[in-house]
Image (cartoon, coloured by chain):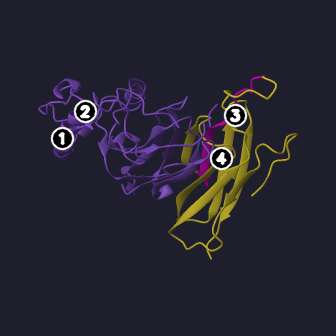
Amino acid sequence: MTAPGGSGTLAEEDSQTPLVTHSVLPSLSRRSFLGRLLPALGALLGLGLLARSPGVFAAPARNEPSRRPGRTDDDEPSEAVKEVLRGLFGDRPIRTGHVQLDMPESPPDGRLVPVFIESDLPMKPGNHVKAIHLLVDKNPDIHVAAFEITPAIGLASIDTRIKMRATSHVRAIVETSRGEVWWATKKVFPATNGCG
Amino acid sequence: MSARLEARPEIGDGRILLPDSIERGSLVHVRTLVSHPMHTGLFNTPEGEPIAAHFVDEVVIRYGEETIARFRWTSGISRDPFVTFPIRADREAPLHITWKDNLGGVFEASAEVRFS
């Protein structure tokens, strides 16, 4: 599994909160240092500041939002993904909702990752889902598939299996005949590289 | 359901699975499968030779005379692509699927939608 990539910054930061750095804690003999350090740590933990201090704990903890399967706190798409989205939808807004994307969070085999997509948007002539797009941010081909459908399909629902190269966001994007674009995103942690 | 007898029968054996009894007007889930390596072109053989990209890139689904869906794929779809989707079974007609791959292969399968 790959380590969380990118900036390493934490989401939803309160920029007014001062960060704790080493310089705040005076250098003393070990006993008195611990005597001061532990209550200080306790106070800081209580305030929630210590957990947000990259200077003291540099490596992301295992429980950090970006590493928990299924969480999408760092789901700001990369430039490459944004370019694919621009090519598909121009500058139309992509809204969250109306799309259900179900996948195992930790598939053991990156060559065979199940995907279940369903949308409750109507399938009437004149107002229907016209395409379901599947994007995998870290795959060699980001735009893995496009399923173009008509009202005869009855319900915008696709189940299939895909390959994944690495831990990545997977995005199911539904486009309607009226030009609306809705999506759902899930972060998936495949155990192996299925793409080569 | 039919399998074209090609020189390489292990590629392109397409299947369509429909429920045994279908009610007129109901939503029917169709399961489809085609045997295909879906090579990405990014792997090598154990001897180090590149394996060329070979994958289904277009699927056309027809219900009677009407084309009801068209899928465009990359090699990111898994080997032996298995896809399930619904249809509104409003008439008795053949459901026909054509899988085309990037090297010119064309594979087909049909199943009859019949009401019970």
Amino acid tagged 3: His
Label 2 crowding class (10 Å Cα cut-off): few <14, some 14-19, many 20+?
A: some
Mark 4, residue position: B81
The foreground one among A116 and A43 is A43
- Res. B64 image quadrant: bottom right
In this picture, residue A117 sits left or right of residue B84 = left
Kindly identify which chain the residue marked by label 3 belongs to: B
Q: Chain letter for yellow?
A: B
In this picture, residue A28 sits left or right of residue A170 = left
Kindly identify which chain the residue marked by label 4 belongs to: B
Kindly identify which chain the residue marked by label 1 belongs to: A
For residue A26, say whether it is visible.
yes
Dot 1 falls on a residue whose secondary structure is helix
Label 4 crowding class (10 Å Cα cut-off): few <14, some 14-19, many 20+?
A: many
The foreground one among B56 and A117 is A117
Q: Which mark is residue A53?
A: 2
- Res. A196 image quadrant: top right
Mark 3, residue position: B39
Contact flag, marks 1 and 3 (Cβ < 8 Å): no
Amino acid tagged 4: Pro
Q: Calculate the distance from the C-alpha at mark 3 to the C-alpha at mark 4.
A: 12 Å
Say if the magenta span includes residue A19: no
Mark 1, residue position: A44
Q: Which residues are magenta?
A: B49-65
Chain A color in figure: purple
Amino acid tagged 2: Ser
In this picture, residue B65 sits left or right of residue A120 = right
Of the two numbered discs 4 and 2 in the rendering, the one whose residue sits closer to the viewer: 2
Q: Calculate the distance from the C-alpha at mark 1 to the C-alpha at mark 4.
A: 53 Å
Contact flag, marks 2 and 3 (Cβ < 8 Å): no
